[in-house]
Amino acid sequence: MNNMNPKSLIVIFGATGDLAKRKLFPSIYRLYEKGNLSEEFAVVGVARRPLSNDEFRNYVRESIENALRQELNNEQFVSHFYYHPFDVTDTASYRQLKSLLEELDDTYHSNGNRIFYLAMAPEFFGTVTSRLKSEGLTATNGWKRLVIEKPFGHDFESARKLNEEIRQVFSENEIYRIDHYLGKEMVQNIEVIRFSNAIFEPLWNNRFISNIQITSSETLGVEDRGRYYDHSGALRDMVQNHMLQMVALLAMEPPIKLTTDEIRSEKVKVLRALRPISHEEVDQYFVRGQYGRGVVNGKEVVGYREENNVDPNSNTETFVAGKLMIDNFRWAGVPFYIRTGKRMTEKSTKIVVQFKDVPMNLYYRTNEKIEPNLLIIHIQPDEGITLHLNGKKSGESMKTAPIELDYCNNCIDGINTPEAYEKLLYDCMHGDATNFTHWDEVAASWQFVDPISEVWENTKAVDFPNYEAGSMGPKASDALLKKDGFHWWPIHYHQ
Ligand SMILES: NC(=O)C1=CN([C@@H]2O[C@H](COP(=O)(O)OP(=O)(O)OC[C@H]3O[C@@H](n4cnc5c(N)ncnc54)[C@H](OP(=O)(O)O)[C@@H]3O)[C@@H](O)[C@H]2O)C=CC1
Ligand SMILES: O=C1O[C@H](COP(=O)(O)O)[C@@H](O)[C@H](O)[C@H]1O
């Protein structure tokens, strides 16, 4: 085991929930298996249902086995898990939790280091943080960190209030706001591809790039999250955070150093440079959709309005396409198109950078149009990059032929890309907040998104449902690009 791994207690609020079961326990286990966790760690689960430590340990074991589809090799691992049942609105129980943490500090020599992970509904975020302070759980000799799940607010105003509440207890550099897309291998690779290749950086601007497209499509519907999703919708659920974070990474200036502050500050500048969309302009720049019935992966599925805990007349969007303009020197005039939705044709996240056309088809002197050069960054499920170029068609002197240069990250033997949560937990334990969002990024993202959601909330979408489950979204999403002379590049594009 690596002794450089910091010792700490991890307190998970919402330890019997979906996120803990599917993502957090398996990630902690993988860190442990790889030696990326100190031997002297302990996890304390908090939730209301009454479980003993043994029952909780069995629950953790089963969660990991289900998620990783493998048997837990190390029985010793679950002995580090403890359970403390209480309702987080009940002040008195925090004192008992405090005593438990002090005991565990002694047992595991964790030097008072504590991570408080809020994996529960956002309405509890403020209550839990203020109780942590009032009941003395944050008064420790070691470091303290707060990991906070999305959604961080419902709009700018609620996010600002929440931020003020948690800032009463934790300083900005102790707050780790999760955007799990920032933990994805290929999202982290965007910076590396841009800034470590001499062939890209000189071209990465409005002189050479005609448009950038980001698609994040899902086949899943809302599953059992209807109650949350029907009050959120795709704009708040995916665009405000994940999609805008990818835009920021693609558009930011090279940071002067690879430090947390410098990288975040470059991202904030991009988010601040997004051209604001007024209420009157929303229809010009954004398209919303809601899925009806259809067939996904060969199976018939119900429409959104028929899903559990969804209003049968719901006006909530399950699909968003948008055109974003970044008003700075580098990007003036280059549209960034984004689209994301549930119940689409397939699960895929891809970025397509389309370069401008050559001035004319000089070498072959034909009327044939040469395909533009594309750089495709495959985020998931395949991970890699493809560069689309043109070459001479063998034997036919007047024709060009497409060439694809492919690099597949997760095809390399022995590479098992870590799950995003695994990387983010590791970073948090090491005090590295680079891949978490700073308040300034969250604020700027809400300020951009708010006028769009205000219009959508106040105008009934008369055409909903407007796309069939299993399709690539409503026709209006194609029209958004067509009016600029572009089209969405297919998910599996081969010339
Ligand atoms: N699930 C996912 O894939 C994702 C979730 N998130 C975010 O993570 C957070 C958790 O989501 P998820 O796990 O799905 O939610 P769940 O509803 O599955 O879990 C909620 C958890 O909170 C506990 N809980 C609820 N009320 C109280 C209370 N008053 N006191 C103590 N514990 C309570 C529940 O346990 P009990 O009933 O025993 O009290 C349960 O452990 C949310 O902010 C969500 O937006 C973000 C991205 C993805
Ligand atoms: O944050 C969220 O992300 C997921 C999609 O994440 P991915 O890693 O599977 O691409 C989305 O399903 C969910 O609605 C949203 O809350």
Image (spheres, grey):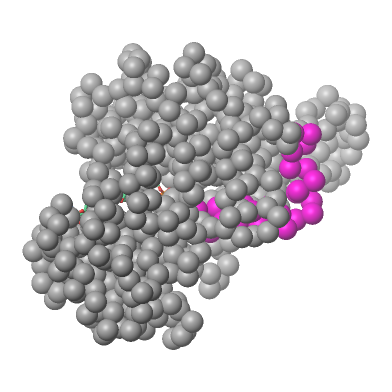
Residue 465 percent location from the top left of the image: 33, 22
Q: Closer to the camera, 219 or 74?
A: 74
- Quarter of the image for the N terminus: give it: bottom left
Residue 265 percent location from the top left of the image: 60, 48
Q: Which quadrant of the figure has residue 112?
A: bottom left
Instruction: Please state the total of marks drawn on the protein image.
Output: 0
Span highlighted in magenta in the image = 181-209
- Quarter of the image for the C terminus: give it: top right
The answer to whether residue 245 is left or right of residue 43 is right
Q: Residue at the spot x=36%, y=74% of the render? A: 141
Q: Residue at the spot x=14%, y=76% of the render? A: 54
Q: Residue at the spot x=79%, y=54% of the render? A: 198
Q: Which quadrant of the figure has residue 13?
A: bottom left
Residue 191 percent location from the top left of the image: 64, 53
Can residue 191 be seen here? The reply is yes
Residue 204: in magenta span: yes
